[in-house]
Image: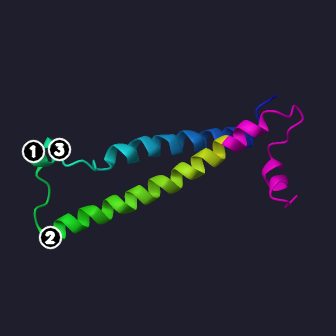
Amino acid sequence: MTPTPISYILGGILIAISLFLVIAVLLQSSKSKGISGTIAGGAETFFGKNKGKSIDKKLTLLTVIVSIVFVALVLVVYVSQFDPHYDANTAILKYFGIF
């Protein structure tokens, strides 16, 4: 199967999403209250704690959404490799019944 422009685009999107997921998971704070929380300290005020929690919630939600998109995109790329006469430019449109 010869690569098409859409396969390069999908590959680039997969690489970008995977890098985002690695960074997003590393940025999330730990749920455990171990010794790292004591050493790091963090914001001790009421508003500081809530602000940190809201940012973590947003980051967690964004990570879940991007993970779902990542899995869906991987499945589309995987399924598209089976047909030797696969046309990557119209496969997604055909899947959704548009073409």
User: Which residue sits at x=65%, y=46%?
Assistant: 73
Tell me the CA gap for discs 1 and 3: 9 Å
- Mark 3 Cα shell of 10 Å, populated few (<14), some (14-19), many (≥20): few
Q: Amino acid at mark 2?
A: Phe
On the image, numbered disc 1 is attached to which residue? 39
Q: Amino acid at mark 3?
A: Gly
The structure residue drawn at horizontal position 85% and vertical position 53%, both measured from the top left corner, is: 94
Residue 65: percent from left, percent from top? 52, 56
Q: In this picture, is 15 found above or below 49?
A: above
Residue 15 image offset from top left, x and y in percent: 55, 39
Quickly name the residue at label 3: 34
> What's drawn in magenta, residue-wise?
75-99
Give the distance between the C-alpha atoms of the residues marked 2 and 1, in whole angstroms. 19 Å
Query: Residue 8 in the image: x percent, y percent?
Result: 68, 38
Disc with the residue nearer the chain's start (2 vs 1): 1
Q: Work out whether residue 42 or residue 8 is closer to the camera in this orientation and state it.
A: 42
- Residue under circle 2? 46
Q: Position of residue 55 (x, y in %)?
A: 32, 62
In the rendered structure, the answer to whether residue 64 lies left or right of residue 54 reads right
Q: Are marks 2 and 1 in contact (CB under 8 Å)?
A: no
